[in-house]
Amino acid sequence: MRPAAAQTTAAPSADAIIRKSLARDFFNYESIKNYTYAEREEDREYTGDGKLKKTESVTDEILILGGRPYEKKIAKDDKPLSESDARHEQEKMDKEAAKREHTTDADRAKIEKDRAEERAYMREIPDAYNFRLLGEEEISGKPAWIIEADPKPGYLPKDSKAKLLTKVRGKIWIDQGEFHWVKMEAEVLDPISFGLGLFRIGQGGILRFEQKRVNDEVWLPTHIFIHGDARLAYVKKMHAEIEITYSDYRKFQSDSRIISDADK
């Protein structure tokens, strides 16, 4: 990492970088709709003294149906599905494909509206944090700014989802050319919940998110990692990790041909 003071040209302020980056979709949703890929999620559960108790994994093939990603399960615990399970997954996909063929403009507008509302809380990020430019680092051969983010004491969120912003601190790596978030590391300061409160991460938990440059045209996810004391379904308390890896990105075209990704 090169410190901010050693950069050869003056960088924008950390606050200005963050504000410009938020005009972008850090998950690159529009671009990811042009790719198929594999998504593997591994869940690890530990005993109270830190010994691995259980590991489970599921691998999905992410396909494009009706212009939107669709998850088709292809493996369980790194073993291919049985013939009957594979047939069931194919039947589910065929049913969903038929359904999406009849998607109306109103349906698509609602999907986009719901997605925009899910991301609305992110507009509060510039007001919810104090930012500091730490330096820069190359990610996928591209220079990125490293910005430290600490919650502002006493900040009162406007959006209910923005409450989680007051409960985490961390670092953000932002691509200098396109202002995309290409890496993030965060520490949980106060318990946070996901999925209607069914999954809860306790204080001290760690969250990581990474992307890579694919085909020298777009940033796409490679890794998500969650570690910490968790609570499932309000009842089960455990020490756990969730690790999601993305691989085998391939360009998808409207004629349904798949183009191999040179940046695997």
Image: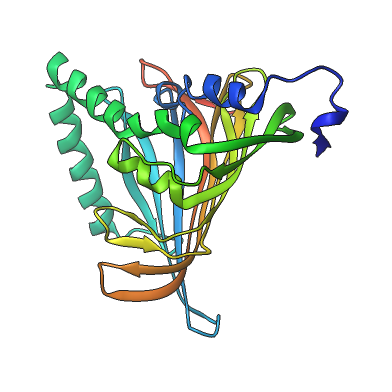
Q: Quadrant of the N terminus?
A: top right
Observer-nearest residue: 188 or 42?
Answer: 188
Using the image as rendered, state which of residue 48 and residue 212 is in the foreground.
48
Residue 264 visible in the shown view: no
The image shows residue 243, relative to residue 105, as above or below, that is below
* Percent coordinates x, y for residue 62 in the rendering: 38, 38
Residue 50 visible at all? yes
Would you say 84 lies left or right of 99 here? right
Q: Is residue 10 left or right of residue 43?
A: right
With respect to residue 115, does 84 lie above or below? Answer: below
Front-most of 48 and 120? 120
Q: Position of residue 144 (x, y in %)?
A: 70, 29
Residue drawn at point x = 48 percent, y = 24 percent: 22
In this view, the residue in front, 2 or 249, is 2
User: Seen from this angle, which residue lies furthest front?
Assistant: 154
Which residue corresponds to the image point at 45% horizontal and 25% vertical from the top-left? Answer: 25
Type of colouring: rainbow
Q: Is residue 178 above or below residue 238?
A: above
| Quadrant hosting residue 102 | top left
Residue drawn 26% across the image and 23% down it:
112
Q: Quadrant of residue 187?
A: bottom right
Q: Is residue 6 left or right of residue 215?
A: right
